[in-house]
């Protein structure tokens, strides 16, 4: 009976560890994806600002960057 209880406890602990490891892995992956998205958005805004300084119109900048024209207009202010 002690052996069974020990094996059951060990299995429970290993299952818990596996669940936590998986959750950590998924959280790290999601964090990396969000970080990359933010980096890409920042890069798009920098390109838009440079394009504004070069005199490009909002529509052209929107096509180049994928940023909506309203946001580009706000960057001009």
Image (cartoon, rainbow, N blue to C red):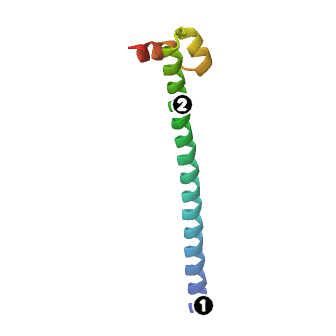
- Quarter occupied by the N terminus: bottom right
Instruction: Place residue 44 in its image quadrant.
Output: top right
- What is the tally of numbered marks visible in this picture? 2
Q: Are marks 2 and 1 in contact (CB under 8 Å)?
A: no
Residue 54 locus on image (x, y percent): 53, 14
Q: Which residue is mark 1?
A: 3
Q: Foreground: 13 or 66?
A: 66
Q: Residue at x 55, y 69 (%)?
A: 16
The numbered mark at residue 76 is none
For residue 1, say whether it is visible: no
Q: Position of residue 52 (x, y in %)?
A: 50, 14
Q: Residue at x 50, y 25 (%)?
A: 45
Residue 3, relative to residue 74: is it above or below? below
- Quadrant where the C terminus lies? top left
> Is 46 above or below relative to 53?
below
Which of labels 2 and 1 is toward the front? 2
- As helix, strand or loop, the secondary structure at mark 2 comes to helix
Q: To which residue does mark 2 refer?
A: 43
Could you say which quadrant of the image residue 4 lies in? bottom right
Mark 1 neighbour class, 10 Å CA radius: few under 14, some 14 to 19, many 20 or more: few
Distance in Å between CA atoms under marks 2 and 1 = 60 Å
- Where is residue 37 drawn, in percent x and y? 55, 36
Given residues 5 and 75, the one toward you in this image is 75
Residue 53 lies, in percent from the top left, at: 48, 15
The answer to whether residue 30 is visible is yes
**Residue located 56% across and 47% down the image:** 32
**Dot 2 surroundings within 10 Å: few (below 14), some, or many (20 or more)?**
few
Q: Of 48 and 4, which appears nearest the observer?
A: 48
Q: Residue furthest left?
A: 77
Question: Which comes sooner in the sequence, label 2 or label 1?
Answer: 1
């Amino acid at each position: 009976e002690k052996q069974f209880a020990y094996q059951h406890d060990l299995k429970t602990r290993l299952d818990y560890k596996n669940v936590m490891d998986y959750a950590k892995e998924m959280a790290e992956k999601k964090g990396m994806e969000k970080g990359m998205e933010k980096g890409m958005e920042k890069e798009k805004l920098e390109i838009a600002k440079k394009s504004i300084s070069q005199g490009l119109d909002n529509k052209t900048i929107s096509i180049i960057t994928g940023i909506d024209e309203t946001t580009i207009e706000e960057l001009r202010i």
